Amino acid sequence: MQMLVAKYNYWIYITLMMIGLYAMIAKNNLVKKIVGMSIFQTAIILFYVSIGAKRGATIPIIEHGHGEGHGAGTHMVHAVDYINPLPHVLMLTAIVVAVATLGVALALAIRVYNRYNTLEEDEILAQIREK
Amino acid sequence: MIWQLDLAILTLVVIAGIGAITVKDLLGAAILFGAYSFMMCLLWSIMGAVDVSFTEASVGAGASTVFFVAAVFRTTRRTKD
Amino acid sequence: MSEQYPALLVVVPLLSALVICVAGWVNKRLCFPIAVAALGVAAYSCIGLLLRVLDEGVIVYKLGGWDPPMGIAYYVDHLNGLVLSVVSVVALLNLIASKKSIDQEFPDKIGPFYTLYVLMVTGLLGIVVTGDAFNLYVLLEIAALTGYGLLAMGEDRAPLAALNYLYMGTIGACFYLLGVGYLYIVTGSLNMVDIAKILPSLYQSKAVLGAFIILMVGVWLKMAFFPLHAWLPNAYTYAPSAASSLIAPLVTKVMIYVMIRFILTVFTPEFAFNILAVSDSIVWLAVIAIVMGAILALAERNLKKMLTYIVIAEVGYMVGGAWLGNRAGMTGAILHIVNDALMTLCVFLVAGNIVYKLKGYAFDDLKGLYRKMPFTMTAFTVGVLSMIGVPPTCGFFSKWYLILGAIRAEHWFFMGALLFSSLVNAVLFFRIIEIAFFEPFTDHHAHGHDHQPEPIDEAPLSMVVPLWIVAAALVIVGIYTSDIVTKIIQFAIPEGIL
Amino acid sequence: MKIIGLIIAVLTGALLIYGTVDFPGWADPASPASTHLSPHFIEKTMEETSVPNIVTAVLADYRSYDTMFETTVIFSGGVVCFILLRIFRRKEPEDRLYRHVLTGATIRVKEGGKIPPDSDDFERIDTLWTPHDLIIKTVCRLLIPFIQLFGLYVIAHGHHSPGGGFQGGVILGASIMLLAISQDLRTAVQRMREKVDALLSPTGVFIYAGTGALCLLLGLNFMDYSALASVLYVDPVTARSHGILIVEIGVGVAVMATIIWIYNNLSSAGKYDEGL
């Protein structure tokens, strides 16, 4: 029970990842699969952001950072006060990769639709088999 | 960080995710996906990842949803599952 | 400038890809020379880098001037250097050979096509050269996205096949990303060497085991290892020939490099072969992959599709060789990366030449081809001999090392699978050679007994010369195999593996 | 297929849960992820790069090489959408429809008929065309300049607050997308031609990679912005800060153009007609 609560974020990310993966494999509609793909990718981003969380810390923007130049004169910055910024950086990259993949996937889906006039995988396969 | 809010939004995220893949209309799926992305973005800002949630709000909930809607308009709303 | 080779080999193609994209809107004829120049510089730096590594050992290049665990660093060792050289040379040769077919197939989209081509090579080179686990993911996605675009440009079923590839490829890349995340959460680092330093104290951790499994599954998906291969045949068959002869030799090989890199550098052989004790079952999977690939290839009546199943069988060779867990097997796997890239390039270029002239791949289209396209088919014969594993060609030597490894590991089924697959390759290719050599080009019913010799109708010189270079390379690499093994590959394998 | 999908999903989930057991607790300040690399970033960023927003500093300086390829990824996404969808030689529809802008009357021109003179009074429309909603049109027209201003602010202020090239670029792109949705694609394309998109998109990436290459030419490693100090006449730390700003602008340009490019191709399936 303790573990269930302590790692709630991780359980949710695994649930979402399973939803996305299931949709990608089992759904019949090509656009539905793409929705599943996006959910899958977002779930992984949630996982990374959860790694970065830190109790008792604030957002990773240094306070009093304006004005008096760099280094000398500013007061000490302690690592425990700020959330781990590295996973955030990685996930910015991952979000952009996800949107590029989404664009390409939708473009391909439109091409497939123009060719077969349907988005259902079984109907497309039936059309291919007929020939 | 307010853990009650965290739990509530996490649950909503799962509901929106399941909704997006089960609804029998692609436009509905696209919009539910937008809702899902926006919930995610709230969740991340609760966890302190402001940059990520800003990006997700503009890219995930904004641009991605528009791409989905555009693609659905160029193809069809019909879906069997 | 030689200190900057590691940066140049990625940056020059990247910048040129952008220039090509702009040039495509101004003057389409500029695109090809820029692309050739870019890949030429990349190949030059790759080979220069390999020579430097041979002299000086491992080269570390800090991007942005930050020290490794903070910033991103390149680690170039013998393994990288070898694979880099192969990738860049193969890409350059294929680019020159494919110019005519690109002009023929996409007259109005030449600019974007070359852009994607050069970007894809950038991505592949970046994957090989990088020393950062997350950076590898980003480059993986570049290579994958451009690959989807290039493959989808083909005939009617190509978009559907590319879409299926996209689903599988995205799952693979996401699994890889998850694995990196699991490693990150227990080690706190993304740098491969740094992770390897921290991991030994965590070998018993379940998170590391989970990371390892999910990472391997992701990489296997990308390389089309047998049960996960379903996307590959259609995607490669319907692709335009310029794209398939770039992607088929390189993508699977680069992913095998990634697998070997993770076994050797990140998880260390100690963990992968001794602590996990899964190597035996993975070799078994490889046996199944080889046998199934060979059998599925036998069932095909379409040249290009048959070749794609052979690619799947070859993936089985390399995965199995790497997981035999001994020096000979690993040597065979690394050597086979080189040889298989060249062999696959050779046969896919032949397929490209055939389709350029004949517009078809079915076996019936190949009749009388030896008289019609003698130069192409001579090169094809060399490639085929290498694929079967006939001594002077390089295919023999890598198979020899793989079989040695199998004997040392006493894994007789893997050896049996290798021999079986060679036999099947022989049957397959002699069937094609029989059709192409003995059967007349014109069908008997229409022209009766009109036995005029078929006029030579060879593909253009710019397609045949690179093909011959590749065919010659097959023999030359075969002759110099012992040098490659003793001077390069030997240093690429850590001493722990006996 | 459904059962196979379920089995695979459950197996993967089980594997991941198995791995999760050994994780450090959620949000634990003593976890390896929070103690190995991140303290250096948090404590040294201000000294080394003079940027208060640590995420921006790590994104565009410590891991700038990643970010360069991330920009390249979206650029290649744009090129792939273009190469897949764009149709240059389309078949013209038999009847062309024109709308008189002032009165809203629609004119149908038969195939081969005379096209109205090239005046501003007529605009080409498609059969799918529906009259614009006045309220939506006006409100969007009013909003777009403010959205663009905000986008520019987000790019420029990424050093001190959440935001940066990506977010700003997407917001700028979204303003043009809003124009395309509230009116039609032709209006948006008139403001931002296809060629402009296709040239700006590589230009943005070029600004990024070119900055890195400039550092290389100035004698330091690729992407080492402190090399820019001699060009900008500032000390190396400030040069890093400026270098970050330059590459963020590059990212913004590339992302803006690419997002619009992808949208244009997707929403018209490559025909560049009415859009949604």
Image (cartoon, coloured by chain):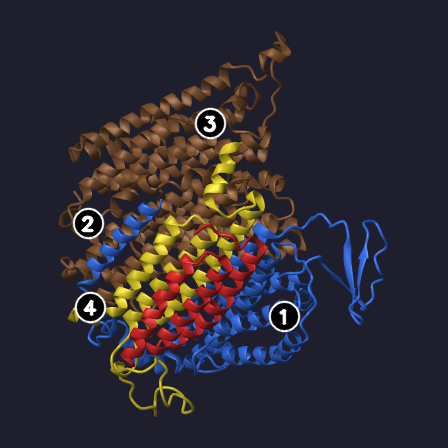
Q: Mark 4 is on which residue type?
A: Leu
Would residue C104 appear left or right of A2 to someone viewing this image?
right
Q: Which residue is mark 2?
A: C272
Subunit ID for the residue under disc 3: C
The N terminus of chain D: image quadrant:
top left
Residue C197 in which image quadrant? bottom left
Residue A107 percent across, percent down from the top left = 53, 53
Residues at marks 1 and 2, common chain?
A: no
Q: Using the image, determine if residue A127 lies above or below residue D115.
A: above
Q: Which residue is mark 3?
A: C380
Cα distance, mark 2 to mark 3? Answer: 39 Å
Is C173 located above or below residue C465 in the figure? below
Q: Which chain is yellow?
A: A
Give the chain ID for the blue colour: D
Q: Position of residue D91 (x, y in %)?
A: 71, 47
Please report, as a chain letter, where disc 1 is located: D
- At label 3, the amino acid type is Phe
Residue that badge 1 annotates:
D182
Query: Which secondary structure, mark 2?
Result: helix
Chain painted in red in the figure: B
The residue shown at (60%, 17%) is: C454
